[in-house]
Amino acid sequence: MRILGCRLDDVDAHEAGERILVLARAGDGAQVVTLGTEMVVYAQRDARFRAAINASALSLCDTVGLLWVARRRGARLRGRVTGVELVEVLCAGAARDGIRVYLLGGAEGVAHATAERLRDRYPGLAVAGSRNGYFEERESARVAQDVRASGAQMLLCGLGFPRQEFWLNEHLKATGCGVGIGVGGSFDAISGKVRRAPPAWRKLGIEWLYRLVQEPQRWRRQLALPVLVALVARDALGARKENAS
Ligand code: UDP
């Protein structure tokens, strides 16, 4: 389905994981997007970003807001797949299948700490390499080259949006990875740099509230949901008018 011109695929975490592992082995440099509410709002004013999302091999619904809007519009979406959940599923599968993973993104040391945690949790996980996500655009070719030299097959890219989508769009092929996935701030959560909402909060779909309490300076980002709802309502009204005329 599409929400305001952005594609969303109806897959759950398990199916997404299996499909991505197949892409990792295929080696063609496929891009995977974990689509969030803010990304759809941002895509309204950046056609290049929207094109990058829609050209992806898989576009997953990352936020409760987006899931809610999608279902209100009658879409058949089984559920959301968060970045953290996806990283966990992928690493479990990669450890099982012997797929080499590279972690790119986060502040200095975060990707490394995430790799340690993931290796503890998924014994046998082959982490080909990791590096922080604070580098200049002109260094990108070298970063991509480093990933290639590591022999990684799956690139977990946590540079935040829209940078990770653009980066993968431009440099994924050069990394030699079969698949690259934009995972936002997942490394911060897995490494423990930011505290994750307790399971009960997550089950209720209110981890955004937990995050807001933890990092109140992010309040502005929470405005994306009411903006999205308003944009969708305007879009639906426009379509109704067009049908009537
Ligand atoms: N980040 C990065 N390089 C940059 C900008 C951001 O590696 O140039 C990282 C940042 O450290 C954080 C992630 O990207 O780990 C973005 O996290 P945020 O929580 O903002 O993303 P979300 O999950 O909400 O998309």
Image (cartoon, rainbow, N blue to C red):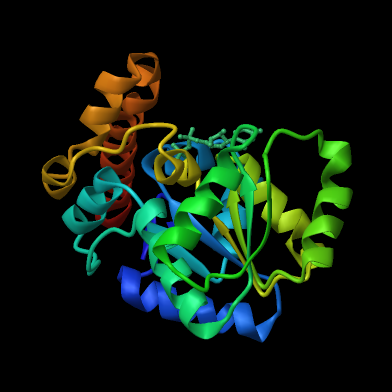
**Quick check: 143 above or below 37?**
below
Q: Is residue 174 left or right of residue 56?
A: right
Is 187 above or below relative to 95?
above
Residue 235: image location, x then y, percent? 33, 44
Q: Nearer the viewer, residue 96 or 175?
A: 96
The location of residue 97, given as percent across then percent down, is: 52, 84
Taking the image as shown, residue 160 lies to the left or right of residue 120, namely right
Q: Residue 72: image x %, image y %?
A: 17, 53
Q: In screen coordinates, is 157 left or right of 59?
A: right
Q: Position of residue 57 (x, y in %)?
A: 55, 71
The quarter of the image that holds ligand 1 is: top right
Please report the residue visible at 52 percent of the width from the left and 42 percent of the height from the top: 43
Residue for point 36% across, 31% down: 224
Residue closest to the eye, 173 or 67:
173
Q: Residue furthest top?
A: 217
User: From where the camera sits, is residue 228 visible?
Assistant: yes
Q: Locate residue 138: give its quadrant.
A: top right
- Count of number-bearing discs: 0
Q: Is 143 situated left or right of 225 in this image?
A: right
Is residue 5 visible in the rendered image? The answer is no
Q: Which of 91 and 202 is in front in this view?
A: 91
* x 62%, y 37%: residue: 109
Q: In which quarter of the image is the N terminus?
A: bottom left
**Looking at the image, which residue is at 19% across and 62% down?**
74
Is residue 73 or residue 218 the one in the foreground? 218
